[in-house]
Image (cartoon, coloured by chain):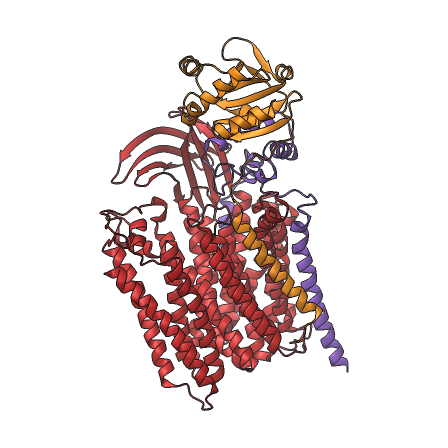
Chain colours: A red, B orange, C purple
């Protein structure tokens, strides 16, 4: 019954999209200033049915209705409630339904929150957003229907994949999708803006909040995904430049560039063309990312189960999107002239965009190159962390420097005097680093530069925060927080990387491993039987030789029966100054265990800094809401 | 819309990208080394599991062709391909078979050969698996066909089936 | 006052660090090698049998005094370019390394011309 209800709702959404598009087109021809009432009503029905359809799927999971194939494949009666719920969006079909929900939600909210804006602009946005909705709903119906049913109804579900039962992984998709899919609204708005010949500044005001929301959630989604990888996947890292990770990073660079350029468009009514291009690019990158992840074209530890027919459909949809938007852009655009002084904030924002596009291009090229090479020459190569680190990290140095400098400049023009203070801060940052260099460590020149520029950004941001508080001018606060977070992030990652200890060795129970600063004693192995898995638990005593500190860590090897999987649970001790990290795996046909021990300094500060970055976006959004 | 050079470039780029994506869908994204033929295998010296002899690449140069087969007594698919190895040993004078006993116990391997028959002209032991890396293999069972100059002419990943068996016969006429 | 506090915390955190490095170079090599039987993992991260064997081979070669490049070349000759995560500089991979910098230079030129044109407009 749920299955039928769900399918009916999906068809209703399809029908409503068509009706909305039709009515909106009619209303555009109408010359009055307000949008017809029935369009609001249709949108309200649309969002209602969409949310209902998602709740229908949720009900299927919560009540274990295995007549729905999707529930059968991805759930199990013994799953905890929280993970039953998360299971609804943790699979391909369910996540598509979530996409559609966000598309429709943003469509509706954009419609009702933009009364002050031009009618044609709002209607065109609605139309193109609904074309997107149409595309996804048709994809859902034809290829990936979460409501397909199965008969006879199985008694138990198949889906108890242990790796997916983790809190961070559970909330990661919704967070990320609000980012990814949230971009759709300003994609549609950009096309609408061209077709309705809307004023640049007004356009900027219309999309600003949406850019902040999608940016904040994209940032949070990426952070939470990294936290999950660190705590769950057992390699002690948090970013692997895996294609699926890159797919989430590409839109992030574009949204960051857009977020900065929108400011210029609003304040100075210039860069209109470029903002439009960025709006189009961002959602195109999101859909490209989805294509890469779900089509099976890439080899990755993260990919969904693969199905080439999905890939074909998404590719078709992507092609339509790209060609339509590019053709409309070329057909209707008007040339702009630029008027930037070198010593203005606008120029610095352009520079930010320059860096963001460079990073974007690098990640895009690195991710796509193996595919292109394979198709064109049949050669297979791998592009991994070394490539990205070598190309990207050096440029982070000038980026940090310019990030500190940029906000000090005013719009249009700046006086030299403002910069003297900045110069003092720079000297302060260099001095601090000289202290570290002298007292603590011998970093290479390169690492020194990274730490200097990061410290520069952090110090200056703190000073700016003080000034902002004093003058009660709160509008700079979000920028300060995010830039501060970024500076801290680079600083902590830099120090963490320099001082991380990672050792790989084999041990038998009862054996000790002596390292320069640690002694690791493999006490014993015990076996425990849990509800749905058997676990082999190793007990290790770690002695930190410098301060005689003793820690106990117990990594596990878990053997699940339903489905049959083997997972390796890392033992992680998170402390304020460093994390201790231990994984253990057995060497087949031997008494030895392969042990990986890591000491990761300042790890928790890395996460805190990352959240501070996102916090800035949240603050900006709240401030804007209060202003309106 | 005016058609100009710039726009043609952009549209060509977009079409090129989408085309490559489409073609990429048809390709297999997993990797195997079956195309790594043409290289020579490096020199090696391994202990035999039967006696105290040493088996080296020099020994292989005396054969027209050698099939190097990575196997282990604990490996289930190895039992499936074993009959093809026996057939090959009986049929073909040109091909000698070198077995590499991968991460195995000598007694278990000898029992395995006693029970299922011994197709191998030589069997070398590879207790820690490092020899398999020398041959560029990464799984078990896996087989490499080399010629007199020790050039790799075929790689078989996984157990030898009927098709691979016939190909080996064809290549070693 | 705030700045002083921050500086003190900074030094405190740093003083709890110490550099320890037994097999930094070995770990770096493990991280640059791709596991052939896994879905997107490096030899450092993989728990597979193949990864364990490769680690033994790499350790042996380091003891023999081989350089990183020699070890990579050795493994590439056995398993192909796919096994290393850092693409080597060959004519096939030239564009991979070249294109990002091309984008960087182009972007810089665009900004240069925009601000230059503005200077002209100001002068006139």
| Residue A608 visible here | no
Q: Quadrant of the N terminus of chain A?
A: bottom left
Instruction: Tell me what residue is drawn at x 58 percent, y 52 percent.
Output: A368
Give the percent coordinates (x, y) of residue A377: 64, 46
* Left or right of A78 on screen, residue A258: right
Task: In this rendered view, identify the residue nearer to me: A278 or A624.
Answer: A278
Seen at 30% across and 41% down, the residue is: A562
Q: Give coordinates of residue A152: x percent, y percent.
A: 23, 50
Q: How many marks can you see? A: 0
Residue A296 at what x, y percent from top left?
48, 49
A11 lies left or right of B30: left
Above or below A285: residue A605: above
Relative to the observer, which residue lies in front, A212 or A273?
A: A273
Q: Residue at x 33, y 66 (%)?
A: A10
Quarter occupied by the C terminus of chain A: bottom left
Question: Which of B140 and B18 lies nearest the eye of the viewer?
Answer: B18
| Vertical order, C92 against B106 (above or below) | below
Residue A561 vertical position relative to residue B87 in the rendered view, above or below:
below
């Amino acid at each position: 019954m749920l299955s039928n209800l769900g399918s009916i709702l999906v068809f209703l959404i399809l029908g409503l999209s068509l009706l909305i598009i039709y009515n909106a087109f009619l209303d555009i021809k109408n010359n009055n200033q307000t949008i017809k009432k029935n369009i609001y009503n249709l949108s309200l029905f649309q969002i209602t049915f969409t949310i209902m359809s998602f709740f229908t799927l949720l009900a299927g999971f919560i009540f274990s209705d295995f007549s729905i194939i999707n529930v059968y494949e991805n759930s199990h009666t013994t799953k905890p409630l929280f993970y039953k719920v998360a299971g609804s969006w943790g699979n391909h079909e369910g996540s598509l339904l979530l996409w559609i929900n966000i598309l429709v939600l943003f469509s509706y909210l954009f419609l009702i929150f933009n009364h002050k804006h031009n009618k044609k602009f709002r209607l065109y946005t609605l139309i193109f957003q609904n074309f997107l909705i149409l595309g996804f709903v048709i994809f859902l119906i034809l290829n990936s229907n979460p409501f397909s049913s199965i008969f006879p109804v199985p008694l138990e579900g198949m889906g108890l994949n242990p790796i997916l039962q983790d809190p961070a992984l559970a909330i990661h998709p919704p967070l990320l999708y609000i980012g990814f899919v949230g971009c759709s609204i300003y994609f549609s708005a950009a096309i609408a803006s061209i077709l309705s010949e809307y004023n640049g500044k007004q356009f900027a005001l219309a999309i600003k909040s949406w850019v902040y929301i999608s940016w904040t959630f994209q940032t949070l989604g990426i952070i939470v995904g990294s936290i999950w990888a660190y705590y769950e996947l057992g390699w002690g890292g948090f970013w692997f430049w895996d294609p699926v990770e890159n797919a989430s990073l590409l839109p992030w660079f574009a949204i960051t560039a857009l977020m900065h350029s929108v400011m210029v468009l609003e304040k100075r009514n210039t860069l209109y063309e470029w903002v439009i291009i960025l709006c189009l690019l961002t959602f195109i990158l999101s859909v490209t990312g989805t294509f890469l992840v779900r089509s099976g074209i890439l080899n990755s530890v993260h990919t969904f189960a693969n199905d080439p027919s999905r890939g074909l459909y998404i590719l078709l949809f992507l092609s339509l999107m790209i060609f339509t938007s590019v053709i409309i852009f070329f057909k209707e655009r008007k040339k702009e002239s630029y008027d930037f002084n070198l010593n203005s904030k606008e120029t610095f924002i352009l520079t930010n965009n320059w860096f963001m596009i460079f990073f974007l291009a690098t990640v895009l090229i690195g991710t796509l190159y193996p595919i292109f090479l394979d198709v064109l020459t049949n050669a297979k190569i791998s592009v991994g962390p070394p490539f990205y680190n070598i190309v990207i990290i050096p440029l982070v140095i000038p980026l940090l420097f310019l990030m500190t400098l940029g906000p000090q400049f005013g719009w249009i023009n700046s006086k030299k005097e403002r910069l003297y203070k900045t110069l003092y801060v720079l000297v302060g940052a260099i001095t601090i680093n000289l202290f570290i260099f002298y007292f603590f460590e011998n970093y290479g020149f390169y690492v020194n530069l990274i730490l200097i520029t990061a410290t520069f950004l952090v110090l200056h941001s703190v000073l700016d925060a003080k000034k902002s508080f004093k003058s009660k001018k709160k509008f700079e606060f979000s920028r300060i927080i995010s830039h501060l977070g970024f500076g801290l992030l680079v600083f902590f990652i830099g120090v963490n990387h320099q001082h991380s200890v990672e050792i790989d060795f084999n041990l038998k129970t009862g054996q000790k491993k002596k390292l320069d600063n640690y002694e690791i004693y493999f006490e014993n192995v015990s076996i425990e039987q849990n509800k749905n898995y058997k676990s082999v638990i190793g007990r290790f005593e770690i002695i930190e030789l410098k301060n005689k500190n003793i820690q106990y860590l117990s990594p596990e090897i878990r053997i699940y029966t339903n489905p049959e999987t083997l997972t390796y649970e890392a033992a992680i001790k998170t402390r304020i100054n460093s994390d201790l990290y231990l994984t253990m795996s057995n060497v087949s046909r031997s008494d030895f265990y392969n042990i990986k021990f890591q000491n990761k300094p300042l790890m928790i500060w890395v996460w805190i800094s990352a959240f501070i970055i996102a916090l800035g976006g949240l603050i900006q959004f709240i401030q804007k809401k209060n202003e309106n | 819309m005016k058609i100009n050079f710039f726009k043609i470039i952009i549209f060509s780029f977009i079409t090129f990208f989408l085309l490559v994506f489409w073609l990429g869908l048809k390709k297999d994204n997993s990797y195997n080394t079956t195309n790594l033929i043409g290289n020579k295998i490096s020199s090696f010296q391994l202990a035999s599991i039967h006696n105290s002899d040493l088996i080296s690449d020099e020994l292989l140069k005396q054969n027209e062709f050698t099939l190097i087969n990575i196997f282990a007594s604990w490996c289930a698919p190895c039992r499936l391909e074993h009959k093809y190895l026996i057939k090959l040993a009986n049929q073909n004078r040109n091909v000698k078979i070198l077995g590499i006993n991968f991460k195995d116990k000598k007694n278990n391997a000898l029992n395995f050969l006693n029970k299922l028959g011994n197709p191998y002209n030589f069997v070398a032991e590879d207790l820690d698996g490092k020899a398999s890396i020398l041959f560029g293999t990464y799984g078990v069972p896996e087989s490499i066909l080399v010629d007199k100059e020790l050039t790799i002419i075929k790689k078989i990943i996984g157990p030898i089936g009927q098709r691979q068996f016939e190909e080996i016969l064809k290549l070693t006429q | 006052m705030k700045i002083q506090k921050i500086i003190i915390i900074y030094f405190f955190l740093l003083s709890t660090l110490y550099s320890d490095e037994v097999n930094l170079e070995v770990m770096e090599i493990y991280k640059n090698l791709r596991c052939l039987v896994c879905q997107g993992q490096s030899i450092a991260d993989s728990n597979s049998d193949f990864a364990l064997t490769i680690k033994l081979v790499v350790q042996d070669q380091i003891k023999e005094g081989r350089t990183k490049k020699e070890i990579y070349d050795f493994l590439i000759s056995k398993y192909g370019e796919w096994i290393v995560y850092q693409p080597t500089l060959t004519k096939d991979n030239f564009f991979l390394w070249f294109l990002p910098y091309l984008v960087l230079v182009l972007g810089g030129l665009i900004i240069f011309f925009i601000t230059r044109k503005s200077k002209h407009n100001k002068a006139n």
